[in-house]
Image (cartoon, helix red, strand yellow):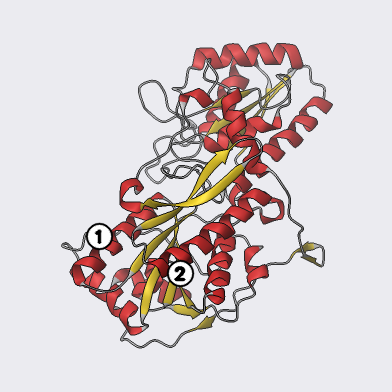
């Protein structure tokens, strides 16, 4: 069987490890793998590359998406049949029998829609989802590849900042705020709590989208910590909201229509420093938290490889419309396996931090939450360096000759322009 692999959505420090898992498993089973440039856009543009000569070890250690990623809302087939015609023309031209789509919630909707379209058309295609997201919000998965490494990076950063804060004296005191990604969920913000070994270590406060923002309670807790320690460290999930459901945003951002998330941490820093006349420091790690391949979790890396390999097996077994999901078997010692989950059942859903993982006051992680998070950041991997910097797999990809006429749709123009 010929397999087509594609990456979609925001990338992670280990998404290429899943790609390496696909390529390795396919080689072991005698299958050919081609990859699409920039996800489904590359399929439309027939911009495909051959994976035969790829060094899987180098690939697995490289952050970002080597093959290119995209965000594209799939139209319904009845509204744009030509869109689907083109996809299946490309698949047929290259004799593709299995589509492995590596992404998050939106990407799983692509898997479900193409699986259904193939059945309607009678095209012999097995569609398999490979989970990926630092947000950790895919239903049906105990955890998502990419999350553990981003969590490790953020928790490490918070612990190191705490050492810096504790080493300085100040008449006014200091507040440090770090804003974590996660959209509408607080998994990454929660992970920073692993940095603290006791209540005096950072982060002293964690704000979740799952717990409505209470300004009075926040200021009371911050005042207590500032009085006791002279500094206060706060983690803010980017998607926190007021009690009325409106997003918390930096007042400097106003109602910028282009800003969906971001600025909540800056607003909290302004609020606390204004209330107590203390120095403020604000950091938004942004892409740093999802691209730090020099500090990946060994558990996360292993799981990323495993879901890629499992996806190949699902395709060869004909398990159409399935997600290669991670299932937790035990916390201590941590044990897990991979199980198939119906993509149509979980696509588009958001897995939020459960209430039992949040402490009673709503501003810290509970012991149950720490037990869940702790195994996911375990283990380190050696980093191969050249001239003192990490060595990554470059962009030397071997393109496959096109067999069809260029696609006239708008989406493929983006791919043509980048090649």
- Towards the viewer: 217 or 193: 193
Q: Residue 183, how many percent across, how many down?
A: 45, 40
Q: Position of residue 55 (x, y in %)?
A: 64, 75
Q: Which residue, given by chain and number where applicable, does mark 2 sit on?
A: 5
Q: What is the distance, in whole Å, between disc 1 and disc 2 at their CAs?
A: 21 Å
- The quadrant in which residue 92 appears is bottom left
Give me the disc on residue 75: 1
Taking the image as drawn, is residue 365 in sight?
Answer: no
Between circles 1 and 2, the one closer to the viewer is: 2
The N terminus, quarter of image:
bottom left
Q: Is residue 341 at all visible to an observer of this figure?
A: yes
Q: Quadrant of residue 195?
A: top right
**Image x and y of residue 165, in percent:** 77, 28
Image position of 173 with respect to 24: above or below: above
Q: Residue at x 63, y 40 (%)?
A: 334
- Judged from this view, the residue extending furthest toward the left is 78
Q: Nearer the viewer, residue 341 or 76?
A: 341
Query: Dot 1, crowdedness within 10 Å: few (<14), some or many (≥20)?
Result: few
Q: What is the x, y in percent for residue 274?
A: 59, 19
Q: Secondary structure at mark 1?
A: loop
Q: 10 Å neighbourhood of mark 2: few (<14), some, or many (≥20)?
A: many
Where disc 2 sits, the SS reads strand
Q: Is residue 292 above or below residue 5?
A: above
């Amino acid at each position: 069987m010929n397999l087509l692999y594609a990456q979609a959505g925001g990338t992670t420090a280990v998404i290429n490890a899943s790609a390496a898992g696909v390529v390795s498993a396919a080689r072991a089973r005698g299958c050919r793998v081609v990859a699409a440039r920039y996800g489904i856009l590359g399929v439309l543009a027939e911009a495909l590359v051959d994976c035969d000569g790829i060094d899987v070890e180098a690939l697995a250690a490289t952050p970002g998406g080597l093959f290119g990623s995209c965000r594209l809302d799939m139209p319904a087939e009845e509204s744009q049949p030509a869109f689907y015609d083109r996809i299946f023309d490309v698949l047929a031209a290259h004799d593709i029998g299995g589509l492995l789509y590596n992404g998050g919630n939106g990407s799983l909707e692509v898997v479900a829609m193409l699986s259904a379209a193939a059945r309607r058309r009678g095209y012999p295609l097995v569609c398999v989802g490979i989970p990926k997201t630092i947000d950790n919000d895919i239903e049906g998965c105990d955890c998502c590849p990419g999350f553990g490494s981003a969590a490790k990076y953020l928790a490490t950063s918070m612990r190191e900042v705490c050492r810096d804060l504790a080493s300085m004296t100040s008449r006014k005191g200091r507040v440090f705020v770090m804003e974590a990604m996660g959209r509408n969920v607080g998994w990454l913000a929660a992970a920073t709590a692993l940095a603290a070994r006791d209540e005096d270590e950072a982060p002293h406060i964690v704000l979740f989208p799952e717990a409505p923002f209470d300004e009075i309670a926040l200021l009371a807790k911050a005042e207590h910590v500032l009085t006791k320690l002279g500094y206060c460290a706060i983690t803010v999930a980017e998607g926190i909201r007021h009690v009325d459901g409106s997003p918390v945003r930096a007042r400097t951002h106003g109602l910028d229509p282009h800003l969906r998330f971001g600025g909540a941490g800056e607003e909290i820093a302004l609020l606390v420093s204004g209330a107590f006349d203390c120095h403020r420091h604000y950091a938004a790690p942004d892409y740093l938290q999802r691209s730090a391949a020099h500090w990946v979790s060994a558990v996360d890396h292993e799981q990323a490889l495993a879901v890629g390999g499992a996806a190949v097996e699902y395709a060869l077994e004909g398990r159409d419309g399935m997600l290669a999901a991670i299932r937790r078997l035990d916390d201590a010692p941590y044990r897990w396996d991979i199980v198939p989950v119906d993509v149509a059942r979980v696509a588009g859903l958001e897995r939020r931090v459960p209430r039992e993982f949040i402490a009673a006051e709503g501003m810290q992680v509970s012991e149950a939450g720490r037990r869940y998070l702790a195994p996911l950041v375990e283990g380190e991997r050696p980093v191969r360096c050249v001239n003192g910097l990490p060595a990554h797999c470059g962009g030397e990809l071997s393109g496959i000759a096109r067999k069809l006429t260029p696609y006239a749709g708008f989406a493929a123009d983006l791919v043509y322009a980048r090649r």
